[in-house]
Amino acid sequence: MTAADLVNRFVLARSAYRRRDAAAAEAAHAHHYLERSLYETGRRGQHLADAVLGATDGVVTTFAVVAGAAGANLSSGVVLIMGFANLLADGLSMAIGNYLGARSQRDFWREEREREIWEIEQIPEAEREEIRRHYRRKGFDGEWLEHAVSLITSDKERWLEEMMREELGIREEKSAPAVSGVVTFSAFSLAGFLPLISYLVAFIRPDFLPRAFSSSVALTVAALFVVGAARWFITRRTWWRSGFEILALGGAAALCAFAVGHFLQALVG
């Protein structure tokens, strides 16, 4: 099964849901590799979420620095120093935080899984009673309840996964923590560099400085809209609505930074 097959299966299912087409939905579920497709899609979805989050934060925080510096009438060199310092420090901080968060989730899952394995081996009757209580709450009773308990506990892996899901409510973290960190940092750095391009040009060609801020605004607007529209791959909301939403939020943050810079410059100067 190829990656394209996995994508097509979910595209078909989502399209069927939007059209409320039961026949198309049934066709989307006719594949015999649902478990693998869920694994692959979950992993890709997490990395895409990391990229969108990193890119959004990179554009907004870097342009906030640019807007604040522009409001204070600082030179292009100062803007670049502040901007690149933000790219490196904030980008690394965000990537490390994402990496540690993902690794902590994975470590927690592994530790709890080991504990459940030990309990199944050492106190199996107590663990069977846990399964019995879970399924009684779901409405099973009598012979059907005992049949469900017997079926689940007859296979150790099935029993273990049931305990992890029903008792603890946790699932295995599919994404690699290191990959999450790298994706976040890369997206943050690439997107965050865009508001600085015009000031880099102005640093090389000083005559461009009067147009540097307006050019930075244009690049930032485009970047925010594209990043926002990319959320369509995660949320499946209308792409242009997602684009304008991120644009409005990012614009508000930048406007605030510009106002603060202008106020402080007037206060000091």
Image (cartoon, helix red, strand yellow):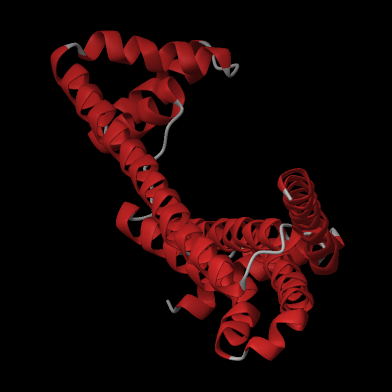
Q: Position of residue 97 (x, y in %)?
A: 40, 44
**So how many labels did they put on this image?**
0
> Which residue occupies 64% across, 87% down?
206
> Which residue occupies 52% across, 77% down?
5
Q: Position of residue 257 (x, y in %)?
A: 73, 51
Say which quadrant the N terminus sits in: bottom left
Residue 43 in the figure: left or right of residue 106: right
> 16 or 179: nearer the eye?
179
Q: Is residue 38 in view from this perspective?
A: no
Q: Is residue 112 in view from this perspective?
A: yes
> Which residue occupies 76% across, 67% down?
15
Q: Position of residue 202 (x, y in %)?
A: 63, 84
Residue 213 in the figure: left or right of residue 48: right
Name above or below for residue 157 compared with residue 7. Answer: above
> 221 or 36: nearer the eye?
221
Name above or below for residue 21 compared with residue 119. Answer: below
> Which residue occupies 33% across, 55% down?
176
Q: Residue furthest front?
A: 269
Residue 183 in the figure: left or right of residue 56: left
Name above or below for residue 172 compared with residue 89. Answer: above
> 82 or 145: nearer the eye?
82
